[in-house]
């Protein structure tokens, strides 16, 4: 299979290049040719005929001279427009055609609010009340969160997860009440004081005891969900002069004290390892750590701890957490890679990567996410030089574009494949739903959390940033289509794509009216949906950055499908066994990230964009916002 992956500048369409200035000559001729000529030619007088002849002669004269490209005000856009237009003026035949073409539309001069309606809006909401109606949709998400919490509270309070169909609790994450901690900051952001009160008093009364008594937990899962949740709650309840979103609940220092106690135990994964790469598992009650049975750690897991550990060091004043976490990234920097891409396993015993499997799905994903997010978190601090993280990120994204990105057939969806046997092997057209974090990360990396409009205006975007942003938009579409090709409107855990080299028949998603039903293959074993957040996470980031309302509309469609097919009447939402069948069989598990991430991102997507601005907060991989500190 060919590995040439032509995701390059030629695929990029820059907004500003669409709108070019019209010369006076074009305006006169086009006006004559489009209005006068069409309407009056039949009755035109000799005078008018001579006038037209003169203009035609003038046109011929001008066409024999090279016309320099017009300038576009923005610096970057100028370069792009100049190149494109230079090509256009070399061919006289084309220029004749252009004379007779309809005048290009000038950019509309609209206020930012109006712009939202005129740009690709799918038109479901009425214009005058649109913000009101998004508020109503946001309220629906809040209601969904309340319904999810009520099921958990009734049947599973204190367990890690709810089994909503059986109406039972289950400890799938070591028994730290993971749903309580994962959900808490979402409740704070939504202003659900009663939930904040219930969750925080459980944390205050039980969590420390659980941490002291419990056995084995996974270092990564516990860090991103429990430690991340505590740190975010600390900030949102006013810790470190943070926001006071929570009117109810304990003093912020309670969250900090529990966070430190937990992190001190988790540190054993680093300190017992013979290298800087931590072991994957920790036994909380005796602060011991060991590697997984195969002796390996996942690359994404060892590199997705640093946002949390850095913030804990910043607020506790104790550098040990950050020091251990950052040693991992500094070490990863020194290891050999393939165009910035890394295998999904690493050995804590040797410190070397293990195997050749490269992917941005499970075990690979958040390595790439944290490179840019940790850089964003630390770039304005005076604690050291972290440019290497940005360099690693940019190299990796170039590698993704060169080695992993392809287009499906027949309808050209852009997707990210995998290299299961390494860089010299074949490219598998398989994309986990987990990969749908990537568009959000790419967009964030391009504008650093600013809107595209502001970043363009301030000349902050490089060609590479624009290229990455375009890829982000294309991949977001693909992730959304992974939902809309199925009978339920919900995405499978894994999709494959038809390409010129890969075809399997009879495995479509079931929605025959989708334009992409022939592009996406869903194998029987991959048809489940775990209420995962990655697509709505990217919709949220893309909406914040591009301000294009289509991302909100897509989010609403996904939310409606969750409501329709995953809601359990007695309380909670359930993961599904098969998204291609209606009604879909339920899997009887509400994952903690449905409350921690999926509903939080949907709520923020439909709400005011000034809440949790992306240039002031960095979301950990479990959607817990941490403030970006400037010193
Ligand atoms: C979450 O725990 C995190 O988002 C993680 O990075 C990936 N998997 C789940 C959600 O799908």
Image: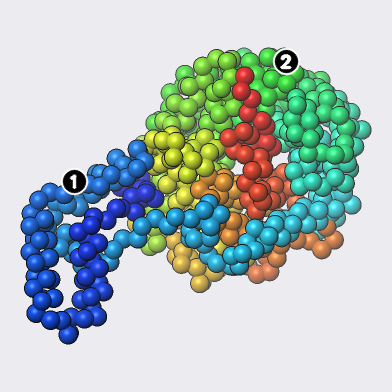
338 over 103 or under it: above or below: above
Quadrant of residue 181 within the rendered picture:
top right
Quadrant of residue 74 within the rendered picture:
top left
Q: Residue at x 35, y 39 (%)?
A: 76
Between the C-alphas of marks 2 and 1, the distance is: 60 Å
Instruction: Say whether residue 629 is left or right of residue 237.
Output: left
Q: State which mark lies toward you, 2 or 1.
A: 1
Residue 238 place in picture, x, y as percent? 79, 30
Residue 63 place in picture, x, y as percent? 11, 56
Q: Residue at x 47, y 44 (%)?
A: 453
Q: Quadrant of the C terminus?
A: top right
Residue 399 visible? The answer is no
- Depth check: 45 or 179 in front? 45
Q: Residue at x 88, y 32 (%)?
A: 250
For residue 317, the mark is 2
Residue 9 place in picture, x, y as percent? 32, 44
33 over 310 or under it: above or below: below
- Depth check: 430 or 222 in front? 222
Element on which disc 1 rests = loop
- Determine crowd level at label 2: few under 14, some 14-19, many 20+ residues with C-alpha closer than 10 A: few
- Depth check: 78 or 29 in front? 29
Residue 343 place in picture, x, y as percent? 49, 32
- Depth check: 90 or 413 in front? 90
Residue 114 visible? The answer is yes
209 over 131 or under it: above or below: above
Element on which disc 2 rests = loop
Which residue lies under the disc numbered 1?
68
Of the two numbered discs 2 and 1 on the same chain, state the one appearing first in sequence.
Answer: 1
625 over 550 or under it: above or below: above
């Amino acid at each position: 299979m060919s590995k040439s992956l032509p995701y390059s500048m030629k695929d990029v369409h820059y907004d500003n290049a669409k709108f070019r200035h019209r010369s006076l000559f074009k305006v006169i001729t086009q006006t004559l040719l489009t209005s006068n000529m069409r309407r009056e030619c039949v009755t035109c007088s000799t005078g008018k005929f001579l006038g037209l002849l003169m203009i035609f002669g003038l046109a011929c004269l001008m066409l024999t001279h090279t016309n320099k490209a017009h300038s576009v005000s923005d610096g970057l856009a100028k370069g792009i427009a100049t190149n494109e237009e230079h090509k256009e003026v070399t061919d006289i035949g084309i220029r004749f055609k252009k004379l007779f073409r309809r005048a290009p539309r000038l950019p509309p001069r609209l206020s930012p609010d109006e712009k939202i309606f005129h740009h690709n809006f799918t038109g479901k909401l009425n214009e005058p009340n649109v913000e009101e109606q998004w508020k109503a949709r946001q309220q629906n998400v809040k209601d969904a969160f309340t319904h999810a919490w009520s099921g958990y509270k009734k049947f599973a309070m204190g367990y890690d997860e709810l089994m909503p169909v059986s109406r039972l609790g289950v400890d799938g994450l070591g028994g730290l009440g993971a749903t309580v901690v994962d959900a808490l900051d979402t409740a704070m952001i939504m202003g659900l004081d009663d939930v904040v009160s219930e969750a925080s008093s459980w944390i205050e009364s039980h969590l420390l005891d659980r941490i002291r008594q419990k056995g084995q937990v996974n270092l990564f899962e516990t860090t991103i969900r429990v430690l991340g949740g505590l740190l975010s709650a600390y900030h949102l309840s006013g810790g470190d002069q943070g926001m006071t979103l929570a009117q109810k609940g304990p003093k912020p220092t309670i969250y900090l004290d529990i966070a430190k106690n937990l992190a001190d135990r988790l540190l054993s994964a680093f300190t017992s390892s013979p290298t800087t790469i931590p072991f994957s598992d920790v036994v909380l009650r005796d602060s011991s750590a060991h590697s997984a049975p195969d002796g390996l750690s996942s690359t994404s897991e060892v590199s997705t701890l640093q946002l949390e550990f850095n913030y804990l060091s910043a607020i506790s004043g104790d550098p040990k957490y950050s020091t251990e976490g950052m040693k991992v990234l500094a070490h990863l920097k020194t290891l050999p890679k393939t165009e910035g891409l890394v295998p999904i396993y690493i050995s804590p015993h040797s410190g070397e990567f293990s195997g050749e499997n490269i992917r941005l799905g499970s075990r690979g994903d958040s390595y790439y996410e944290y490179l840019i997010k940790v850089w964003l978190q630390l770039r304005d601090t005076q604690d050291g030089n972290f440019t290497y993280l940005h360099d690693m990120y940019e190299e990796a994204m170039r590698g993704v574009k060169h080695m992993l990105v392809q287009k499906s057939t027949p309808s050209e969806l852009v997707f990210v494949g995998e290299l299961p046997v390494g860089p010299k092997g074949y490219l598998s057209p398989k994309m986990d739903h987990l990969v749908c974090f990537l568009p959000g990360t790419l967009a964030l990396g391009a504008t650093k959390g600013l809107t595209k409009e502001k970043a363009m205006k301030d000349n902050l975007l490089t060609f590479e940033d624009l290229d990455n942003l375009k890829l982000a938009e294309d991949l977001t579409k693909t992730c959304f289509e992974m939902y809309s090709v199925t009978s339920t409107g919900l995405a499978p855990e894994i999709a494959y794509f038809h390409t010129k080299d890969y075809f399997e028949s009879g495995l479509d998603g079931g929605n025959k009216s989708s334009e992409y039903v022939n592009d996406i293959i869903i194998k029987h074993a991959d048809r489940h949906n775990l209420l995962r957040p990655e697509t709505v996470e990217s919709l949220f980031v893309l909406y914040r950055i591009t301000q294009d309302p289509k991302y909100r509309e897509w989010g609403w469609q996904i939310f409606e499908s969750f409501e329709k097919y995953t809601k359990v009447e007695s309380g909670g939402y359930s993961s599904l066994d098969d998204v291609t069948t209606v009604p879909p069989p339920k899997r009887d598990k509400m994952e903690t990230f449905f409350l921690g991430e999926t509903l939080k991102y949907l709520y923020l997507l439909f709400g005011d964009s000034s809440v949790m601005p992306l240039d002031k907060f960095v979301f950990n991989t479990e959607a817990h916002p941490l403030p970006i500190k400037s010193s």
